[in-house]
Image (cartoon, helix red, strand yellow):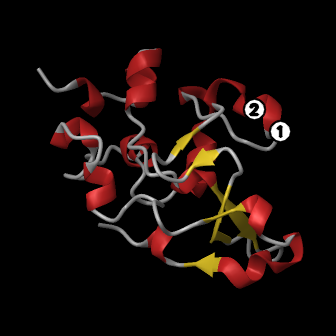
Amino acid sequence: MADWWQQPLAALTAAQWEALCDGCGRCCLHKLQDEDSGEVFYTRISCRYLDTDSCRCSQYPRRSALVPDCVTLTPDNQAALDWLPPTCAYRLRARGEPLREWHPLLSGDPDSVHRAGISVRGRVLPEEHVHPDSHEEHIVHWVEEER
């Protein structure tokens, strides 16, 4: 029998869904969208609630109330997956692709995502330290890199 993370997203339990997150923190980066093309650009600016060491939300249960535009991913809103980084397990599984070898479910080690250079650890600025008019100055391209 296949491992549960190889199943379609809709077949996962709530606990399995949550466990699919690799803990990279890339989804917690501020994004800019070109009004004309619709292209999404990642910045190195993180949500104020992202613990930049663990790369996990410090207010996870309350995140949607605290940050109204925080998208809660569910198997029912897979359209939201398009803006996630190409390495994101939710995006990969929605496309029927396997997890990357550094994913903690495969490696058995929650720090493997950090050692692989996938997480935002050491690469971001919390939003409260960045002037709102300077977000374009903080666009990064390492988020789109696939490893």
* Residue 42 horizontal/vertical position (percent): 62, 69
* Residue 51 horizontal/vertical position (percent): 56, 46
* Residue 29 horizontal/vertical position (percent): 63, 59
Which residue is at 30% across, 48% downward? 97
Of 65 and 9, nearer the camera is 65
Of 121 and 42, nearer the camera is 121
* Residue 80 horizontal/vertical position (percent): 63, 45
| 39 relative to 21, above or below | below
Of 79 and 28, nearer the camera is 28
Which residue is at 24% across, 36% downward? 105
In the shown orientation, is residue 66 left or right of residue 96? right
Task: Kindly identify which residue carries mark 2.
Answer: 64
For label 1, count other residues whose C-alpha is less than 10 Å away and answer few (under 14), some (14-19) or many (20+): few
Which residue is at 72% across, 26% downward? 62
SS for callout 2 = helix
| 3 relative to 56, above or below | above
Quadrant where the C terminus sits is bottom left
Residue 52: numbered disc:
none
SS for callout 1 = loop
Q: Are marks 2 and 1 in contact (CB under 8 Å)?
A: yes
Q: How many marks?
A: 2
In the shown orientation, is residue 109 left or right of residue 83? left
| 22 relative to 44, above or below | above
Task: Kindly identify which residue carries mark 1.
Answer: 68
Which residue is at 15% across, 26% downward? 2
Q: Amino acid at mark 1?
A: Pro
Q: Amino acid at mark 2?
A: Ser
Disc 2/disc 1 C-alpha distance (Å): 5 Å
Quadrant where the N terminus sits is top left
- Residue furthest to the right in view is 133
